[in-house]
Image: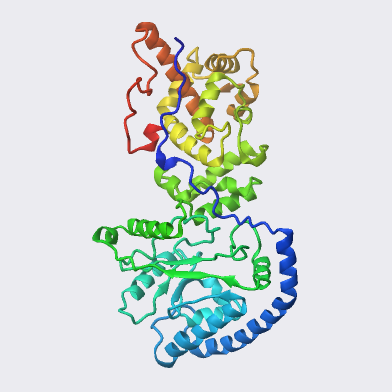
Amino acid sequence: MPPQRVGALPRQQSLLLPAVINPFVQDTKLSNAAIIKCVLLGIFLVPLRAIFITLVLMVLWPVSVIVTFKLPLKGAVEPSTGWRRFLCQRVMAALGRAYFFSMGFRVVVKAGLPSTVSRVENLATPIFGRFLRSLQPVLVSRTDPDSRKNTINEINRRAKSGGQWPQVLIFPEGTCTNRSCLITFKQGAFIPGVPVQPVLLRYPNKLDTVTWTWQGFKSKTLLLLTLCQLYTTVEIEFLPPHIPTEEEKKSPALFASRVRETMAKALGVPVTDHTYEDCRLMISAGELTLPMEAGLVEFTKISRKLNLKWDNIRKELDGFATMASTCKGGRITIEEFASFLKLPVSPVLEDLFRLFDRNGDGTIDFREYVIGVNILCRPSNTEDVLKMAFQLFDTDEDEKVTHDEFTALLCSALGVSDVDMTKLFEAIDADGSGFITFNEFQEFAATHPEYAKLFTTYLELQRYQAIQEANPGDLELAGQPSSGEEPEESTSDKKDD
């Protein structure tokens, strides 16, 4: 019976594909009837609403100036009191409702204006920046290394002020999505360990003109489409406050997760582990001429499971882009995989490819590549393994691998013959000396981890063949469960994969 090929153990549920592949794309399609309706209504509604919006802003801006008169430009030291609080909570709340009514929104809100967490750059926005200042926001700066700590401290201070500060309104996802799911909640709102009140927004309109995210309609287009509607309905639902347990107070991540589950259940949508960092990777993929969605990996899950930071995954994207530069759709086939490795398609290479191809669709996307490289390849890329592989090549033990030695072993490992390995040999032979030293071999393996798993797979097959010759039928390939046995559950995805 031929040896069983290296196959994949049952995949960890924690690394399966998310329920929503890309929550950062807006794909509303405008039918001809919708376009005609927008044009006909827009002729009358857009000018009329533009006038009303202008009138509201003409009143809103001076009120904001009065509220913020002689207050610090950035941030607020003390909560507003007296006439400032009255103007902010009553007058500006009414003007805010008038503003949304002018845009055609039907909104019912049973609460005063809360403080918000906002980017410091938003203060520079004409008119709206002054309005934002009057709400005494908690300001976040993405360029200040201390901003995250300061923001958390300020949220904590306001949340425990005993009602002196208004409620703090926080958008815990930290970025815009297409509302098809709830992505990972950031922990800032949950660190104080005080009750939070989940608030749900629904837009039950036939035509979606409010979803603004990373791919799709631009903000100006969405604004124009919204103004062209007879009305736009928004439903605001206040769920019961979530009072944290002692366990949740000690673990903001657990607190955030349970609040998200409550909100997702009420909305009837799934949850995913995508974050704003996925958006950054998506933009980086576009810069590398890959489809933008190629950069989506569910950053929170991948970084936690594989102990990777954003910079690590961003570097992996460069390697993937090099391999996938000629691929349509940013997915690598076995032929392109072999071409990148400068090797022929062979049973051993197909085994390695299948280990990367987690969903078995015959291609490798960036998410599968990141998981494969870090679970399969990097653990195999140790100095001991590399020394053993180098010794296999170095048949005359002179600490140098010649072109003939290199070609002979690779052909044997891959089960092929008469293959030109010159390009791969020259890529490893960095100094062009005509032979490969261990330092060159090690340096190449560090930048091309895919080869490490290729050699360890070959070593496992060789070991299996030796065992079978000594004790035929007694043992199976190392790492494979015997029939009828369940694979041992492990807390480590690296071990199971």
Image location of residue 375, percent across then percent down: 44, 35
Quick one: 31 or 374, which is closer to the camera? 31
Q: Residue at x 45, y 63 (%)?
A: 145
Q: Residue at x 39, y 18 (%)?
A: 477
Q: Is residue 331 left or right of residue 259?
A: right
Viewer can see residue 433? no
Image location of residue 238, percent across then percent down: 41, 70
Relative to 328, say whether 180 is above or below.
below
Image location of residue 495, percent across then percent down: 37, 33
Q: How are the residues colored?
A: rainbow
Relative to 264, say whether 87 is above or below.
below
**Image quarter in which the C terminus is found:** top left
Image location of residue 483, percent across then percent down: 35, 20
Viewer can see residue 339? yes
Q: Residue at x 59, y 81 (%)?
A: 127
Relative to 267, say whether 230 is above or below.
below
**Quarter residue 343 falls in:** top right
Count of all numbered marks drawn on residues in the image: 0
**Image quarter in which the N terminus is found:** top left
**Quarter residue 247 falls in:** bottom left
Quick one: 343 or 421, which is closer to the camera? 343
Farthest-out residue, bottom: 83
Farthest-out residue, left: 246
Q: Residue at x 60, y 30 (%)?
A: 337
